[in-house]
């Protein structure tokens, strides 16, 4: 008799907007407004889920994709740790790592100026995950 394996739920599968909202409410950071704006840009892709992971806002869709490095206080830094990000050509993405890229925003002006490019990068990562 064949049995079907039920997929076990993992933390990777659980969206926790309420937990991330509580994290943001308690966050003390000089660029808190910019962090919130970048969060909104990332979440504008309806496939993206969010939670607090590694003690920071983190976003995922099928895989962990991007996390804030909230320890930086002079700019908002994103760590794109979904390895296929290295295939995306963008002036926003920096670093010559084999499996990740970084993005930084020093103020709200940079956040707004790079909104469409950040949305494009997120969409490309979602497309890559869907193609797997």
Image: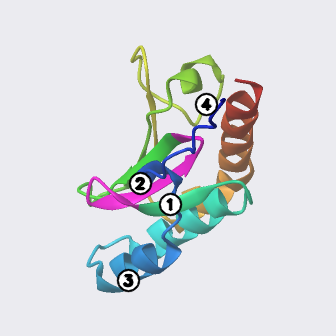
Residue range corresponding to the magenta coloring: 52-63
Say which quadrant the C terminus sits in.
top right
Q: 86 or 30: nearer the eye?
A: 86
Question: Is the Cβ of the residue at disc 2 closer than 8 Å to that at disc 3?
Answer: no
* Residue matched to label 1: 14
* Residue matched to label 3: 22
> Where in the figure is residue 40, as x and y percent of width and height?
61, 68
Magenta stretch contains residue 55 = yes
At 52% from the left and 61% from the top, the residue drawn is 50
At 50% from the left and 60% from the top, the residue drawn is 14
Q: Is residue 105 visible?
A: no
Gap in angstroms between the C-alphas marked 4 and 3: 33 Å
Question: Is the Cβ of the residue at disc 2 closer than 8 Å to that at disc 4?
Answer: no
User: Circle 3 — which element?
Assistant: helix
For marks 1 and 4, give the one nearer the viewer: 1
> Where in the figure is residue 16, as x and y percent of width and height?
48, 70
Left or right, 51 with respect to 86, comes to: left
For marks 4 and 3, give the one nearer the viewer: 3
Sequence order check, earlier mark of 1 and 4: 1
* Residue matched to label 4: 91
User: Circle 4 — which element?
Assistant: loop
* Residue matched to label 2: 11
Gap in angstroms between the C-alphas marked 2 and 3: 18 Å
């Amino acid at each position: 008799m064949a049995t079907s394996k039920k997929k076990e739920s993992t933390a990777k599968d659980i969206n926790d907007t309420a937990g991330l909202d509580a994290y943001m409410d308690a966050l003390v950071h000089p660029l808190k407004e910019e962090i919130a704006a970048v969060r909104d840009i990332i979440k504008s892709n309806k496939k993206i889920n969010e939670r607090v992971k590694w003690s920071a806002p983190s976003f995922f869709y099928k895989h962990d994709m991007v996390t804030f490095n909230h320890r930086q206080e002079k700019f908002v830094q994103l760590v794109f740790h979904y390895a296929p990000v290295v295939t995306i050509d963008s002036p926003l993405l920096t670093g010559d790592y084999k499996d990740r890229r970084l993005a930084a925003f020093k103020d709200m002006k940079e956040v707004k100026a790079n909104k469409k490019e950040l949305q494009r990068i997120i969409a490309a990562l979602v497309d890559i995950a869907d193609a797997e």
